[in-house]
Image (cartoon, helix red, strand yellow):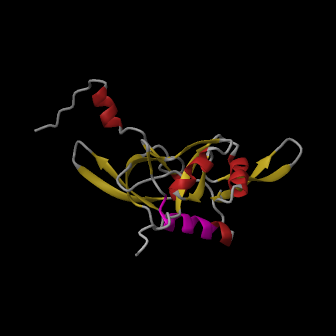
Amino acid sequence: MFDSYSPPELRWFALYVRVRHERTVERQLAEKGLEAFLPCYVARRQWADRLKMIEFPLFPGYLFCRFTSQQRGAVLSAFGVVRIVGFGNQLMPVDDGEILALQQAVRAGVACEPAPYLKIGQRVRVGYGPLNGVEGILTEAKKGHRLVLSVTLLERSVSVEVDEAAVEAVSAPPLQALRAQGAAFRVPA
């Protein structure tokens, strides 16, 4: 007779933890025999009397842990763990390829630092340089960022390339914000 039992699958999950408790949680999970991953970067900080290099989490308040559904209780019992990231009561695993890429970047020692999460089609604003304050739609993010600047009234657009570090997300497009305030717009005939 065949045994229908299959071992539970180890998956990576993101853990939301108390800020500045990431290392403590990582250590506790390792003591419980669980694989934890806390990607970090090094930044230079200036004090009045010295300059120091300090390591910070790439995702403050989060770390990753690889476990099965049966190990969920052990993960949640670690001091500092607030919750396992998911939707409602459903745990959502992190893609193995994304974790592998982060681990490879950290192991390789390449310069990593936090960056805003920008999506193609998202409204963004240029934060510095000759286009400081200009808003547009992000259309490409491969070799630098390409924005589309539009004149809504004329229904025309121009594509420009800007330094990727200068781009930041905009919460609401100005036109939508004005409409929300009750402003009326007319297009000339």
Residue 132 in picture, x, y percent from top left: 49, 46
Taking the spot 28% from the left edge, 46% from the top edge, the residue there is 151
Foreground: 98 or 30?
30
Task: Note whether residue 5 is visible.
Answer: yes
Foreground: 39 or 156?
39
Quadrant of the drawing holding the N terminus: bottom left
Foreground: 34 or 111?
34
Taking the spot 70% from the left edge, 43% from the top edge, the residue there is 20
Q: Residue furthest right?
A: 49
How many numbered marks are there?
Answer: 0
| Residue 110 picture quarter | bottom right
Task: Note whether residue 115 is visible.
Answer: no
Is residue 80 positioned above or below 74 on the image?
above
Q: Residue furthest front?
A: 1
Residue 126 in picture, x, y percent from top left: 48, 48
Q: Residue furthest bottom?
A: 1
Q: Residue furthest left?
A: 189
Q: Which residues are magenta?
A: 94-105
| Residue 187 picture quarter | top left
